[in-house]
């Protein structure tokens, strides 16, 4: 027996103590337990630009066609025909929460823990406001106060906050952030791939976004709208194209919209948009559009394609169903994979100043702001490269031919806004709903789900109905049916 | 004492006679039964050696033995008889039937051989013939339909794809649920090397497919916890023990050669598409090349009239049905398997060395695999008390173009299935334009030209795998031994997949280069004792320790946008990404077992094991990282204990209770980690939280317990036997990834409160209705019914979301109170009478309203049945297998898309004069009846195609799975040649369905071997196989 006990002990020795070194073994050797705040900031900016997935679906397929910048015969381009593809409609929600929002909440927590300077926190707060404003503008009530906090606070099923409550908080965040920003370079430094850490530029952005979100309230709460616009202008908004809020993409981090055009040959320039550019003899036309068949940018060769048509309808209408003769976005200039992704421009700000002047007498002179806006919108195309540079005299000619029209100021300003935000379709769609301009003629494709009206929002992720049913149901009860025609809070009729 | 003396004597005799080989002589004779009929297949062994042979069909044997040897004659169901040679050269003998003494020996846990009568649990052993007659590239598929309670799913993933094997129901909500494979005593990796999902992809194959069917001696299936308790946590899904062939039982030097060829042909009987209407949109055929290009896969055109109409390539062709594109596109697959083995057996050493080549050309053009395997199995007696065993297998597998499945990009199956009937798939050749780019047929760039997908997407993986083990046994005393065993499984897969320059959806293309390294080392040390305490009372006991260590590493290089067209190399890309994944885990264990037997009719076995898990360990963690679990089982041979009526040959009752615990499947799931990911933008690195699952810092082991009872009854001299088992198992504290709202930032959270139960019955009835000298007929029916139930997930009964197909309107989900893996999807909105509710749109077209997501079916069929028959007439034999599965459902993505594109036969209704639709108008709540105009059918069916309920159908089937007709050359005819055994078989498999419910697809065509069973989406169509197998020994 002694011998067998000895052998048993030997056996245990052979195998080793049963859990020796197990604790260290289960620490992942390839993943750090934390990364620097600056690395997270860079990632957040990339997440805000996002990827092909949502830029294709929510951005291009739905909004660009609803806004009649783009058109196509392709049936899966649901926005062109007001049909409903749930997965496409919810794509921004599906990408933003898991990437941008999750990272922003995490970075805010880290900055608090590390007692980071207020200006760093302010930069992240501004990005957070931007991300949430995109979400709530497109979908209405969305998870806000409880979102992105599964790890931080153990909230697995966030409630949906009313847009009427989200908006005041976003504006308050902007106000506080602007106040926290001074001058000089923040500690984020060059990890801030938007402004290189320049606090003054972030401050202008905070106020410019405040102006944007303030104006969104024009229909639902004109008083608040005016108050926020006043505050934003007083705080100092963007003053030149040097202030534009955009991300420069590169071959390793491609522009999601550029990737859409790489994979998809279906989109054409909408007749509505081409007609507008041609009517004004707009120097932007050959930069934005080119003929599909041969890339010609001669104005006479650029024919806009009507929205809401499929091949048989086109055949019936024109006797021809080839769409190669029509214009498409100019692939050699604006749809490259290394193009900038633009979030807010100085031109937009000038148009908003013009409108604020018309409405409330704020900010000096509407005509000047209009002229500045048009000029900036034409000049900022140079972000797309040297082939996109518009000569000053062409701009002057354009303004001479299309001067500020006091009688139709709001329509004119917002139509220019619509033209200036081509490809930033999130903003195009929001501003169109807010202002009602340009006046777009809806299509009425067989089988559309909106009764022939332009959609007013996109719909929630289908997964919410099964994983977060109570909060989803509460949101639908509060806001109205989860369909394309339901209006968000600020979009009152 | 008697036993001890005998072994002593044997060893002494052996040693004494060692080297004295000159006195060997040939002994021959005939073995008969009591009645004088010759007995085939009787084992004749020289006592105390591994020298042996068996009788031929006429009961003849020849054996070369020592003149003073003792011959042992044994055969299943007969009493073993020993006869001394005493210098004779002819020994004719008879052996007596022994119904009650069925000393059938099987391989049990840890490789311990036991008599079946001692087992308190269900164990099924399948021998070589079942696996090596009808061979499949993945040997485990040969078990389908043959073992009650073993549910095998062969998927639509191509010849090199994975199989899913689940024993007695899946018991873990998020774990892998497949059994542990133990080959020659050591566990091997059976990880899935990639599978298709929502967005497409291909199946990377599994671990068990590396085994060469010709090397397998037997497969033991340990179904329940009592059988597998000694293997511990990894055996929670049961254990499949594979024993490879050794030189044992051979007479000296021998050579075996085996060759088989199989031809596969896609079973086009399955597809039943409409052949009356051609390509077009809203009832109109395309009027131009452009329109045809834009119409793509849409079959909503006009009735075929044979008029010349333009197609995608600008060529006008008759607008008429051009025949079955599936038939035209897929080729005849072939599989050649050739194995040669040499064996040798001497007194101190036996070995078997084999080499095998498997060459498969899949039915999908340009896809296939080649597998070369080399195997050595050797054992040696090193000394009086020391024996050793060495096993080594080296496998080189090269797979070309694993089929892309599921979503359409690069998926040839998708495009071929959906091509409108007036487009002949062969016109899509050549696959490229003059500039080398994809010659597309549709404006949807994701509908890839199938020839481009097959011939221009170059994907290849090469696998180099070594599975080796060695064991050493030292007999300390004649009743006490110490065994050490170390095994290694080292598996390296190198994979390259290219989306070529010129791909329509990715014009500049891209390349992925990947290397997956897997390494498992498993070591056991076992001290075993076996002792007869009294004449009737015996003990057998062991204690052991085990250490299991698994490392895996995945190196990945990705490149996008080729610079020089045609050069498919990572260096020739504009942008590159790289990553490395690494994981390491260990399990440490101690275990013991004690078997007590009384008078060879009562047995009871106790086991206990404690496992420590690295995956449950973390610095500062306070909850335990280990668990202890016991088991007990017993058996009573009632037919030996009591007097039974004479027709009862054998009757055994068995029963057991067991517990098994298990750790987290993957390491590093206890703590939140971050990562630097992708490539820097503007030189700035990107950082984020790693993963999308909320970690759980306090995970503890899950536990599975099982109660099993069974009955083994053999009647009428074993002519009829019945094996019946009932089991009931429950998993608690299952580690589960519960669904969270995506808006929480995470898609799931790790919880530790899952509870799953399974209960079921298994039966096996076998009979030998005819048993004469020249003709025998054996028949067996096996069946199993398993009822799985999800009892709990977390403290608020969250759903556990598994996969969804590309349609995204349906998902496999675990729901508390429902069966495992229910199919949950969009239903029709109905009124209280069940009438479908429609929205009538501006054009008057009724569009079905999407109702709530509800349970539409269960993905795993609960009832499985197999029916085997084997007939033998003289030297001919005929075997066939019919199997079936019942009670499950499948969501067919293929049928969904066929509705949307108008190729499904059901969409014919209304094409001529419109379709009458009645229902409830959602606007008014009132019934309506309207006629949908032919041009609006596309809208009408297009809406139905979003409703998953329409496409969830019963997956029931009865399949004529296998048939073989074999002929063995009579031994006598081989006497004068050097051959000793020749066998030729004609084989066929997947011949036809006797019953099938679902339209157009094979009910066994899921695209993943994971837990999400019940989803089908454009896999490789199933094929019939015919072939020939030859086995020769000399």
Image (tube, rainbow, N blue to C red):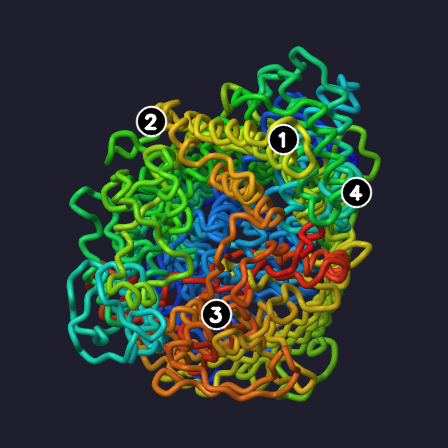
How far apart marks 3 and 1 lie (CA) works out to 43 Å
The residue at the point 40 percent across, 56 percent down is B408
Q: Mark 3 against mark 4, which lies toward the viewer? A: 3
Give how far across and how far down residue B911 sits, in percent: 36, 82
Q: Residues within 10 Å of mark 4 (few under 14, many from 20)?
A: some
The residue at the point 35 percent across, 23 percent down is A386
Give how far across and how far down residue B756 sits, in percent: 73, 61
Residue matched to label 1: B688
Residue matched to label 3: A447
Please tell me whether mark 2 sits on a helix, a strand or a loop: helix
Which callout, 2 or 3, points at the residue further toward the start of the chain?
2
Q: How crowded is mark 1: few (under 14 residues within 10 Å), some or many (20 or more)?
A: many
Please tell me whether mark 1 sits on a helix, a strand or a loop: strand
Residue matched to label 4: A154
Q: In this view, does B220 lie to the left or right of B613?
A: left
Which callout, 3 or 4, points at the residue further toward the start of the chain?
4
From where the camera sits, is residue A452 visible? yes
How far apart marks 2 and 3 lie (CA) works out to 42 Å
- Residue A387 marker: 2
How far apart marks 1 and 4 lie (CA) works out to 18 Å
Please tell me whether mark 3 sits on a helix, a strand or a loop: loop
Q: Do labels 3 and 4 share a chain?
A: yes
Q: Mark 1 against mark 2, which lies toward the viewer? A: 2
Foreground pick, A397 / A460: A397
Which callout, 2 or 4, points at the residue further toward the start of the chain?
4
Give how far across and how far down residue A259 sits, in percent: 42, 40
């Amino acid at each position: 027996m002694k011998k067998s006990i000895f052998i048993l002990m030997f056996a245990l020795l052979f195998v080793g103590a049963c859990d020796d070194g197990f604790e260290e073994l289960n620490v992942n050797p390839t993943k750090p337990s934390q990364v620097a705040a600056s690395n997270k900031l860079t990632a957040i900016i990339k997440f805000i630009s996002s990827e092909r997935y949502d830029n294709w679906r929510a951005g291009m397929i739905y909004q660009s066609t609803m806004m009649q910048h783009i058109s196509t015969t392709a049936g899966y381009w649901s926005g062109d025909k007001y049909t409903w593809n749930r997965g496409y409609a919810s794509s921004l929600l599906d990408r933003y929460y898991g990437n941008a929002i999750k990272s922003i909440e995490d970075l805010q927590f880290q900055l608090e823990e590390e007692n980071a300077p207020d200006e760093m926190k302010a930069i992240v707060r501004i990005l957070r406001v931007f991300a949430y404003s995109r979400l709530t503008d497109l979908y209405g009530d969305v998870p806000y106060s409880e979102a992105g906090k599964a790890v931080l606070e153990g909230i697995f099923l966030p409630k949906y906050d009313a847009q009427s409550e989200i908006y005041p908080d976003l504006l308050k965040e902007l106000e506080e952030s602007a106040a926290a920003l001074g001058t000089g370079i923040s500690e984020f430094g060059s990890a801030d791939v938007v402004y290189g850490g320049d606090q003054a530029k972030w401050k202008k952005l905070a106020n410019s976004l405040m102006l944007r979100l303030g104006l969104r309230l024009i229909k639902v709460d004109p008083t608040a709208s005016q108050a926020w616009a006043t505050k934003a202008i007083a705080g100092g908004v963007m003053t030149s194209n040097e202030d534009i809020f955009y991300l420069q993409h590169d071959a390793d981090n491609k522009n999601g919209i550029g990737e859409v055009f790489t994979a998809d040959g279906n989109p054409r320039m909408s007749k509505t948009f081409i007609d507008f550019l041609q009517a004004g003899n707009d120097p932007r036309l050959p930069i934005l559009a080119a003929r599909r068949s041969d890339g010609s940018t001669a104005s006479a060769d650029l024919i806009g394609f009507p929205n809401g048509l499929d091949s048989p309808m086109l055949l019936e209408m024109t006797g021809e169903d080839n769409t190669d003769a029509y214009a498409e976005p100019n692939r050699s200039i604006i749809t490259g994979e290394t193009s900038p992704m633009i979030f807010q421009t100085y031109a937009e700000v000038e148009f908003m100043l013009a409108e604020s002047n018309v409405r409330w007498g704020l900010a000096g002179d509407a005509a000047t702001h209009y002229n500045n806006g048009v000029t900036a919108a034409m000049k900022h195309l140079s972000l797309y490269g040297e082939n996109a540079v518009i000569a000053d005299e062409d701009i002057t000619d354009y303004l001479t031919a299309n001067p500020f029209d006091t009688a139709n100021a709001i329509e004119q300003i917002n139509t220019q806004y619509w033209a200036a935000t081509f490809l930033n379709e999130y903003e195009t769609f929001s501003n169109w709903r807010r202002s009602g301009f340009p006046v777009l003629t809806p299509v009425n494709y067989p089988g559309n789900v909106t009764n022939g009206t332009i959609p007013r929002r996109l719909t929630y992720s289908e997964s919410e109905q099964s994983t977060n049913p109570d909060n989803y149901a509460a949101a639908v009860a509060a806001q109205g049916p989860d369909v394309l025609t339901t209006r968000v809070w600020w979009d009152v009729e | 004492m008697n036993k001890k003396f005998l072994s002593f004597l044997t060893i002494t005799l052996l040693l004494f006679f060692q080297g004295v080989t000159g006195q060997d002589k040939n002994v021959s004779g005939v073995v008969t039964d009591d009645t004088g009929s010759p007995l085939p297949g009787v084992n004749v062994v020289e006592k105390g050696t591994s020298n042996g042979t068996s009788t031929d069909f006429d009961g003849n044997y020849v054996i070369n033995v020592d003149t003073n040897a003792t011959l042992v004659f044994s055969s299943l169901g007969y009493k073993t008889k020993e006869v001394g040679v005493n210098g004779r050269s002819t020994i004719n003998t008879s052996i007596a039937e022994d119904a009650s003494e069925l000393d059938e020996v099987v391989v049990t846990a840890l490789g311990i051989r036991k008599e079946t009568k001692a087992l308190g649990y269900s164990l099924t052993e399948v021998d070589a013939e079942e696996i090596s007659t009808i061979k499949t590239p993945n040997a485990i598929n040969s078990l389908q339909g043959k073992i009650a309670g073993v549910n095998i799913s062969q998927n639509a993933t191509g010849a090199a794809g994975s199989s899913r094997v689940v024993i007695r129901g899946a018991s873990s909500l998020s774990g892998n649920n497949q059994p542990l494979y133990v080959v020659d005593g050591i566990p091997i990796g059976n990880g899935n090397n990639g599978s298709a999902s929502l967005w497409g992809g291909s199946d990377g194959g599994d671990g068990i497919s590396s085994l060469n069917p010709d090397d397998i001696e037997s497969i033991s299936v340990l179904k329940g916890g009592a059988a597998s308790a000694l293997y511990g946590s990894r055996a929670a899904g049961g254990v499949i023990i594979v024993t490879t062939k050794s030189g044992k039982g051979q007479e000296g030097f021998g050579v075996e050669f085996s060759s088989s060829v199989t031809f596969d042909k896609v079973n086009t009987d399955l597809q039943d598409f409409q052949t009356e209407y051609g390509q077009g949109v809203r009832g109109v055929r395309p009027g131009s090349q452009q329109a045809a290009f834009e119409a793509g896969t849409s079959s909503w055109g006009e009735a075929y009239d044979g008029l010349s109409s333009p197609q995608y390539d600008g060529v006008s062709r008759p607008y008429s049905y051009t025949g079955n594109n599936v038939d035209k596109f897929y080729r005849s697959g072939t599989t050649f398997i050739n194995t040669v083995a040499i064996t040798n057996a001497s007194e101190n050493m036996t070995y078997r060395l084999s080499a095998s080549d498997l060459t498969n050309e899949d039915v999908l053009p340009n896809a296939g695999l080649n597998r070369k395997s080399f195997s050595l199995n050797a054992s040696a007696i090193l000394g009086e008390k020391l024996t050793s065993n060495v096993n080594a297998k080296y496998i080189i597998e090269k797979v070309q173009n694993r089929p892309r499945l599921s979503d359409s990009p690069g998926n040839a199956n998708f495009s071929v299935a959906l091509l409108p009937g007036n487009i002949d798939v062969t016109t899509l050749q050549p696959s490229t334009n003059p500039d080398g780019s994809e010659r597309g047929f549709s404006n949807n760039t994701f509908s890839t030209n199938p020839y481009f997908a097959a011939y221009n997407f170059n994907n290849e993986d090469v696998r180099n795998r070594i599975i080796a083990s060695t064991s050493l046994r030292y007999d300390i005393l004649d009743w006490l031994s110490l065994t050490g065993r170390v095994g290694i499984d080292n598996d390296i897969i190198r994979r390259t997949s290219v989306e070529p320059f010129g791909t329509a959806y990715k014009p500049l293309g891209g390349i992925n280069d990947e290397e997956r390294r897997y390494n498992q080392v498993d070591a056991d040390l076992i001290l075993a004792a076996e002792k007869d305490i009294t004449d009737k009372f015996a003990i057998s006991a062991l204690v052991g320790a085990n250490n299991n260590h698994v490392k895996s590493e995945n190196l990945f290089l990705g490149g996008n946008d080729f610079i020089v067209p045609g050069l498919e190399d990572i260096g020739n890309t504009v942008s590159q990404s790289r990553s490395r994944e690494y994981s390491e885990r260990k399990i440490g264990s101690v275990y013991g077992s004690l078997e007590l037997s009384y008078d060879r009719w009562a047995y009871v076995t106790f086991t206990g094991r404690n496992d420590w898990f690295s995956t449950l360990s973390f610095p500062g963690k306070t909850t335990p990282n280990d668990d202890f679990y016991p088991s007990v089982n017993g058996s009573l041979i009632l037919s030996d204990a009591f007097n039974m009526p004479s027709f009862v040959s054998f009757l055994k009752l068995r029963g057991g209770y067991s517990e098994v615990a298990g750790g987290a499947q993957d390491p590093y799931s206890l703590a939140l980690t971050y990562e630097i990911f992708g490539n820097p933008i503007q030189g700035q690195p990107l950082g984020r939280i790693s993963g999308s699952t909320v970690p759980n810092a306090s995970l503890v082991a899950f536990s599975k317990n099982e109660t099993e009872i069974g009955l083994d009854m053999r009647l009428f001299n074993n002519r009829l036997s019945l094996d019946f088992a009932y089991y009931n198992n429950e998993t608690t504290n299952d580690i589960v990834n519960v669904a969270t709202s995506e808006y929480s930032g995470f898609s799931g959270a790790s919880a530790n409160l899952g509870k799953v139960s399974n209960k079921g019955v298994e039966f096996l009835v076998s009979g030998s209705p005819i048993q004469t000298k020249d003709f025998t007929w054996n028949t067996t029916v096996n069946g199993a019914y398993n009822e799985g139930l999800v009892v709990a997930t977390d403290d608020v009964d969250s759903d556990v979301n598994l996969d969804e197909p590309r349609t995204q309107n349906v998902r496999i989900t675990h729901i508390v109170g429902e069966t495992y893996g229910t199919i949950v999807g969009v239903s029709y909105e109905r009124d209280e009478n069940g009438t479908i509710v429609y929205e009538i749109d501006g054009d008057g077209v009724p569009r079905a309203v999407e109702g709530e997501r509800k349970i539409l079916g269960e993905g795993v069929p609960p009832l499985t049945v197999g029916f085997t028959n084997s007939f033998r007439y003289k030297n001919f034999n005929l075997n066939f297998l019919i199997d079936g599965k019942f009670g499950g459902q499948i969501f067919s993505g293929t049928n969904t898309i066929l509705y949307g594109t108008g190729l499904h036969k059901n969409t014919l209704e209304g094409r001529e004069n419109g379709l009458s639709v009645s229902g409830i108008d959602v606007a008014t709540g009132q019934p309506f009846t309207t006629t949908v105009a032919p041009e609006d059918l596309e809208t009408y069916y297009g809406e139905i195609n979003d409703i998953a309920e329409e496409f969830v159908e019963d997956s029931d089937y009865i399949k004529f799975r296998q048939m073989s007709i074999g002929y063995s050359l009579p031994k006598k005819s081989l006497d004068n040649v050097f051959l000793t055994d020749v066998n030729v078989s004609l084989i066929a498999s997947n011949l036809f369905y006797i019953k099938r419910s679902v339209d157009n697809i094979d009910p066994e065509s899921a695209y993943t071997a994971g837990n999400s069973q019940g989803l089908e989406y454009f896999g490789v169509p199933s094929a019939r196989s015919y072939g020939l197998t030859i086995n020769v020994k000399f």
